[in-house]
Amino acid sequence: MIIEAAREEFAENGYDGARTDRIATRTGMSKGVLYHYFSSKDDLFVAVLEDIYQELRSQNEALVLAEFEPEAGIRELIAHTYQYFVDHPEFIVLVNSENLMKAQHLERSESIRSMFTPLSRRLSELISRGQEQGIFRSNVDVVELYVSIVGLGYFFLANRWTLGVVFNRDLLGKGAEEVRLQHMTEMVLDYLRNVKSLDGKE
């Protein structure tokens, strides 16, 4: 209950604007009781960040990549990751806030660095299967690949209001999210497909 209330408060007001007394009010408990569980606003924000990253990890773990053929698995991973951002816009707000503070709260987390190790391993296995079948290129950095998958969706969803004005296009209208998903999926797959790289390797 505390984490959920804090998540809403930080998402609505950002880190600087969030107030622990409002979080306490949302939970129906006193501020003193709140501080019994979390000694500071910083500690509470760390817990909120861990919670949203754990939620994203769980979303991805629900997708059993080993059950898919390589290209289908990549499509499903992209769709799952993107849909999480669509369904949870607070993730973008909270992570943006933390980036403005240069990840000073995530640096304190004991769990966050190992949280995505299972996904990296399963993605590596999927890529390896695609390479063995000759459909994926050989020189794939799995971390860079996942950062690109996240970035292609995250940037669009975080900036579509300004991008819509700049390019005079309705990026909030019906179908805009689906168009973006299709575009980013094809971009990632075009990168992965087995063509000669710039250094001449397959």
Image (cartoon, rainbow, N blue to C red):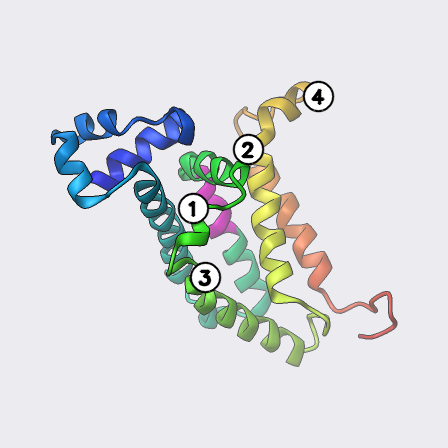
Residue 113, label in figure:
3
85, 143: nearer the viewer: 143
At 24% from the left edge and 24% from the top edge, which residue is drawn?
22
Mark 3 to mark 2 CA distance (whole Å): 24 Å
State yes or no: discs 3 and 1 in contact (Cβ < 8 Å). no
Q: What residue would you read off at disc 1?
A: 105
Magenta residues, as a range? Answer: 79-86
Is tag 3's residue or tag 2's residue first in the polypeptide sequence? Answer: 3
Q: Residues within 10 Å of mark 2 (few under 14, many from 20)?
A: some
The mark lying in front, picked from 3 and 2, is: 3
Say what secondary structure mark 2 lies in.
Answer: helix
Q: Amino acid at mark 4?
A: Val
Where residue 131 sits, quadrant-wise, is bottom right
Packing grade of label 4 (10 A; few <14, some 14-19, many >=20) is few
State the CA–CA distance, disc 3 to disc 1: 13 Å
Query: Three-letter amino acid code at disc 1?
Result: His
Q: Earlier in the sequence, mark 1 or mark 4?
A: 1
Residue drawn at the location 83% of the way across and 69% of the way down: 196
Position of 115 with respect to 184 (left or right) is: left
Disc 2 target residue: 158
Whether 30 is drawn above or below 104: the answer is: above
* SS label for mark 3: helix
Q: Nearer the viewer, residue 82 or 26?
A: 26
Instruction: Name which residue type carries label 3.
Output: Arg
Residue 166, numbered label: 4
Residue 136 is drawn in which quadrant? bottom right
Task: Assign a secondary structure to mark 1.
Answer: loop
Mark positioned earlier in the residue sequence (1 or 2): 1
Residue density around tag 1, few if under 14, some if 14–19, many if 20 or more, within 10 Å = some
Q: Which mark is residue 114?
A: none
